[in-house]
Image (spheres, rainbow, N blue to C red):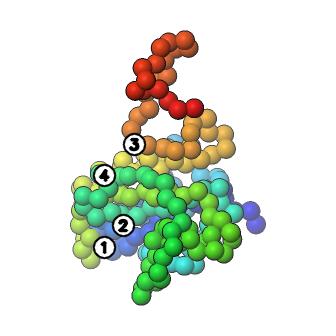
Amino acid sequence: MRRAALLVLAVGNPSRGDDALGPLLLERLQQSSRLTLGDVELLTDFQLQIEHALDLEGRQAVLFVDAARPGTACGATLTPIHAAPCTLPASHALSPQAVLQVATQLAGRAPPAWQLAIEGAQFALGEGLSPVAEHHLTLALALAQQWLQSQRPSAATPRCVSATPVPAQPPAGAAIPPATRQPR
């Protein structure tokens, strides 16, 4: 069976307030009418584990999604990540970088990966989503949709997405000030 080229792997506990941001993002992606998920697999779990390295095999790219503590993600932040050696923790939880490292050890490589951190405010057991987290979830949904569009083979945009809008290109032959010149 052929695997979807793109994997969005979200972690979080829906019973712990804003820790539900990862799984909620996947629900919003499924409901989004702006996106066709045919070549995308959405996977959610309470935490990343060593077995998730197997989910990365044969992927073109992967997006890890998780809630972030207050003051650490500026609302929602999308950053490229790479495999990093790790010491296995006493619990079963791993970082995305550790999962990438295990995938590299198993298969000789890991797919290009990004982490989408969504800032939360309250993580107490039995709490619902905070208003701040709801706002950050909206920002994160837009970033995830941009990332998915940029990773598709037919995408004409670069494979890196940012929350900062890219300025429009000047007309052909127009002088470009050095500070805004785009590298080629």
- Whether residue 53 appears in this view of the structure is no
Element at badge 2? Answer: helix
What residue is rendered at 61% in x and 35% in y? 156
Q: Earlier in the sequence, mark 4 or mark 1?
A: 1
- Between disc 2 and disc 3, the foreground one is 3
Q: Residues within 10 Å of mark 2 (few under 14, many from 20)?
A: many
**Residue 177 percent location from the top left of the image:** 42, 20
Q: Quadrant of the N terminus?
A: bottom right
- Cα distance between the residues tagged 2 and 3: 22 Å
Q: Observer-nearest residue: 117 or 31?
A: 117
What residue is rendered at 66% in x and 75% in y? 106
The residue that label 3 is drawn on is 163
- Between disc 2 and disc 4, the foreground one is 4
On residue 75, the disc is 4
On residue 16, the disc is 1
Q: Observer-nearest residue: 174 or 137?
A: 174
Up-down relation of residue 163 to residue 124 (above or below): above
Q: Residues within 10 Å of mark 1 (few under 14, many from 20)?
A: some
What residue is rendered at 63% in x and 74% in y? 105
Residue type at the position of mark 4: Gly
- Whether residue 78 appears in this view of the structure is yes
Q: Is residue 25 left or right of residue 122?
A: right
Up-down relation of residue 120 to residue 165 (above or below): below
- Cα distance between the residues tagged 2 and 4: 15 Å
Q: Residues within 10 Å of mark 3 (few under 14, many from 20)?
A: few
**Residue 46 percent location from the top left of the image:** 43, 75
Element at badge 3? Answer: loop
Q: Residues within 10 Å of mark 4 (few under 14, many from 20)?
A: many
Residue type at the position of mark 1: Arg
